[in-house]
Amino acid sequence: MDILTLVGLIAGILIVTLAMLANASVITFMNLPGLALVLGGTFAVTLIKFRLKTVASAFRLAFGAAFTDRTDNPVDLVREVEALARIVRKDGILGLERHETKNLFLRKSVSLCVDGHPPEFVEEALLEDMQQTMERHEVAERVFRGIGESSPAIGMLGTLVGLVQMLNVLDDPSSIGPAMAIALLTTLYGAFIAQLIALPLADKLQLKAQDERRNMALIVTSITNIMRGQNPRVITELLSVYVTPEQRTGLLKDQG
């Protein structure tokens, strides 16, 4: 569970809500037609930009990636593939059959190796898998950025509709203030959805995609070098570029 994403989301919504209710009641900020206009309009624009299947997949990926911490530590991956290299050096490629790993991409890589495919084929298959995974993340990020762009615009559209309605009742000065407040609420709803939900989730998806791309590239590099019979120490040195300088120092110390 990526607790920071959940804490940040709840904290942001709570802080804004408390600020809104400091000198007003919940009813002051409730306008169901305006909320329906923003939500419905944003959803309609999103469906125009993307397929329904793509939108559904983006929401599943967002809540699966943004709210869970499934990305492996690259240091742990480097140590694991170093162990794989030592197994291959001692027992050959078939020695990898007994290795168990929780990383699905590494598991697929090991399976391709054990099946006896040449290094060029394995590398090509893994790179294609990585590219498709990154494209799915990119599309999901684009969906949420689209929502973040559309909701404020739809909110402004709702405000213009409310202003037009307000101008039609200028003969009653007492109704201008409440009507103006209701007109502005749609802009508030649009900004709320964009700045506190959609855009932060898009940024988190981008960050998780970068982490996953780094780990997948690490695995591709390690597997191709293992299949070519590279020395485990050399493989670790090659993979050290995927970790921070502090972590790199620790890895090289572990090697003695």
Image: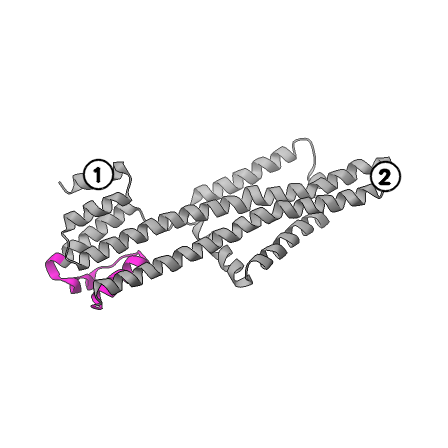
Q: Is residue 111 magenta?
A: yes
Residue plotted at (48% across, 44% down):
6
Q: Nearer the viewer, residue 252 or 51?
A: 51
* Residue linked to disc 1: 250
Most distant residue in the top direction: 23
Type of amino acid under label 1: Gly
Asked if one can make out residue 69 in the rendered structure from this viewpoint, the answer is no
SS of the residue under disc 2: loop
In terms of secondary structure, what is the magenta stretch mainly? helix
Residue plotted at (70% across, 34% down):
24
Q: Which mark is residue 151?
A: none
SS of the residue under disc 1: helix
* Residue linked to disc 2: 170
Residue plotted at (61% across, 55% down):
45
Q: Is residue 217 left or right of residue 224?
A: right
Mark 2 or 1, nearer chain start: 2
Instruction: Compute the Cα span from label 2 to label 1.
Output: 73 Å
Q: Which residues are magenta?
A: 89-116
Residue plotted at (53% across, 48% down):
145
Q: Quadrant of the C terminus?
A: top left
Give the foreground label among 2 and 1. 2
| Colouring used for the render | one colour
Q: Quadrant of residue 207?
A: top left
- Position in image of residue 192 (x %, y %): 60, 42
- Position in image of residue 41 (x %, y %): 65, 53
Q: Is residue 137 left or right of residue 19?
A: left
